[in-house]
Image (cartoon, helix red, strand yellow):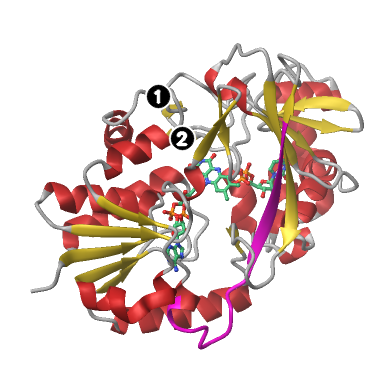
Amino acid sequence: MKEYDYLIVGAGLFGSVFAHEVSKRGKKCLVIDKRAHSGGNIHCEKIEGINVHKYGAHIFHTNDKDIWDYVNQFVEFNRYTNSPVAVYGGKIYNLPFNMNTFYQLWGVLTPDEAIKKIEEQVKNSGIKEPKNLEEQAISLVGIDIYEKLIKGYTEKQWGRKATELPAFIIKRLPVRFTYDNNYFNDKYQGIPIGGYNKLTEGLLNGIEVQLGVDFFADREKYESLCDKIIFTGKIDEYFNFEFGELEYRSLKFEHQILDQENFQGNAVVNYTEREIPFTRIIEHKHFEFGKQAKTVITHEFPLEWSSGMESYYPINDDSNSLKFKKYSDLAKKETNVYFGGRLAEYRYYDMHQIIASSLKLSKIC
Ligand code: FAD
Ligand code: UDP
């Protein structure tokens, strides 16, 4: 009989949901995380009374009522709706691409006029079956929007040409012919009142958590402690990088406290020009409609990733996908070790998808 039923490597959202669910069934868990805090990338730090999203802006959205009810058991969510704006050439454009954007670009007033304009541009491009992000973007919204609002942002975000990126990345963004600046199509959306830490604390309440502990620093000890392992770290690291390292895109966040109440009037402002080195400025207080005297802003700089850096976005191109397939084949052969979350599954997952995937795993193992 081992000391724990489960060792959960990673106190991010995946690990926390899993630990919560199996603990409810009376299982004994140990959750470890190499960072000094739980929550993984949804962790917030309170600065000047403002919940600062330390690892990038996080907006919760889902179409699934069960997932929405699930998170609302732990913390109430507010009615925040993400409506970022883009700055290009000193002008503001609404996102996602909608009638406001089409009006700002072309002066068109009706959906028919906008559709006609886009269809004309798509036809001129000659693209029939989009094979990469550039072709996908042009066939969705035409060349003007691609050049002003997508190309520069995408190429600095990913550090690669848009022609070398997979089309699915741009399909995340809605295109609509209504005057609606809501960035998401989902039925439910919001920010936890009081910050994401309330969600993590609720999930991990009563569960043993050890922070500042790296699984690989004492792998054998941890393996001997438990019957089963839920691993939410990097899958390539688990297998000693046997097939080489999976590549990521990294980010640098520069947080600043400003002695003014309102810096940019919106939580998210994107800078779509290639020449501006950051992709967006986040003003955190607007996520919770804050009225504090000061404000905290974050410039988000995309960075070339190299070994040892924080791994944010998986690069799901052909060579990395092939490499990942080899690791996932090895993972299938493991007994009593289960892999989940954005690092172990090497997927560009949103929070609601992580929760759904963790709930599913918790029911079968
Ligand atoms: P993580 O949060 O990365 O947690 C994994 C944990 O494992 C980490 O805490 C790590 O320290 C720990 N760990 C790794 N290796 C080890 C080890 N060897 N030993 C011990 N611990 C280890 N989603 C949305 O729904 N809406 C958004 O607006 C949104 N915005 C985002 C913005 C950015 C910039 C990024 C990068 C992501 C965003 N996401 C968003 C996605 C969201 O962050 C993820 O879906 C979610 O947090 C992933 O949870 P996870 O538990 O899989 O991973
Ligand atoms: N994107 C863009 N211009 C923008 C915002 C997004 O071209 O102003 C593209 C870019 O390629 C980005 C993708 O759309 O990687 C997905 O954007 P999202 O805002 O969903 O990215 P995330 O918040 O996950 O970084």
Residue that mark 1 sits on? 77
- The residue segment tinted magenta is 238-256
Whether residues under marks 1 and 2 lie with C-beta atoms below 8 angstroms apart, the answer is yes
Is any part of residue 359 visible from this angle? no
Residue at (82% x, 31% y) in the render: 87
Q: Amino acid at mark 1?
A: Phe
| Residue 234: x %, y % from top left | 48, 69
Number of marks: 2
Q: Quadrant of the C terminus?
A: bottom left
| Residue 41: x %, y % from top left | 51, 48
Give the quadrant of ligand 2: top right
Mark 2, ligand 1, within 8 Å: the answer is: yes
Pick whichever of labels 1 and 2 is earlier in the sequence: 2
Rendered view: 116 above or below 364: above
Secondary structure beneath disc 2? strand
Residue at (59% x, 57% y) in the render: 312
| Residue 54: x %, y % from top left | 58, 41
Residue 352 lies left or right of residue 312; in this view the side is: left
Residue 155 lies left or right of residue 76; in this view the side is: right
Q: Is residue 254 magenta?
A: yes
| Residue 7: x %, y % from top left | 26, 65
Residue at (80% x, 20% y) in the render: 108
Rendered view: 120 above or below 171: above
Residue 2 lies left or right of residue 270; in this view the side is: left
Q: Amino acid at mark 2?
A: Phe
Which labelled disc corresponds to residue 60? 2
Counting other residues with Cα less than 10 Å from the Cα at mark 2, is it few (<14), some (14-19), or many (20 or more)? many
